[in-house]
Image (tube, grey):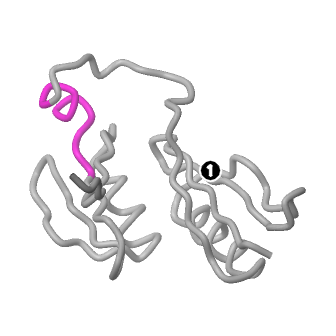
Amino acid sequence: MSVKVTSIMLGVKDLDRSKKFYAEGLGCEIGQDYPTFVNLNLGDGSSTLALYERNAAAQDAGVSPKGSGFTGISFHYIVGDHDAVDQTIKQALSAGGTLVREAAASEWGGYFGYFADPDGYLWKVASPA
């Protein structure tokens, strides 16, 4: 068996707010739009991103919707250069995201920063050099 991620689902507190952040703010194309579920296309070669109302998602999985702190998950977006890192983070902040770590050079030679979406999910934006 070969493992392939075809969709990533985020349980969100406010579906309309998250849909606006990802679709209007970051430019993701809406593939499906239902009252409790939105599926976004992230581009060729990428998984889709599903937004599901948090309580409904927890119920679907049979777990508690409560949780806090770092979940052990972050999303990484690799771009071509420092300017693209800065521009992507700026766009996320303009859309309602929160700056988590200001972009800066790293010890491994790259350049990266972090932002969080409106529900606190972490996104690392990095360039290799």
Q: Picture coordinates of residue 47 (x, y %)?
A: 31, 65
Numbered range of the magenta stretch: 51-60
Left or right, 39 with respect to 81, comes to left
Label total for image: 1
Q: Characterize the magenta stretch by its predominant secondary structure.
A: helix
> What residue is disc 1 on?
98
Left or right, 40 with respect to 126, comes to left
Q: Picture coordinates of residue 18 (x, y %)?
A: 36, 53
Judge whether 47 appears above or below 100 on screen.
Answer: below
Q: Tag 1, which secondary structure?
A: strand
Judge whether 111 appears above or below 80 on screen.
Answer: above
- Identify the residue at horizontal 28%, vertical 64% (top origin): 48
- Identify the residue at horizontal 80%, vertical 76% (top origin): 129
Judge whether 79 appears above or below 74 on screen.
Answer: below
Left or right, 3 with respect to 26, comes to left
Q: Residue reaching furthest front? A: 1
- Identify the residue at horizontal 12%, vertical 31% (top origin): 60
Left or right, 121 with respect to 113, comes to left
Depth check: 96 or 119 in front? 119
Q: Can you tell which quarter of the image residue 124 is in?
A: bottom right
Q: Picture coordinates of residue 3 (x, y %)?
A: 28, 53
Q: Amino acid at mark 1?
A: Thr
Residue count near mark 1 (Cα–Cα under 10 Å), binned few <14, some 14–19, many ≥20:
many
Asked whether 61 falls inside the magenta stretch, the response is: no
- Identify the residue at horizontal 73%, vertical 81% (top origin): 81
Judge whether 68 appears above or below 9 on screen.
Answer: above
Asked whether 59 falls inside the magenta stretch, the response is: yes
Q: Picture coordinates of residue 43 (x, y %)?
A: 35, 79
Depth check: 99 or 82 in front? 82
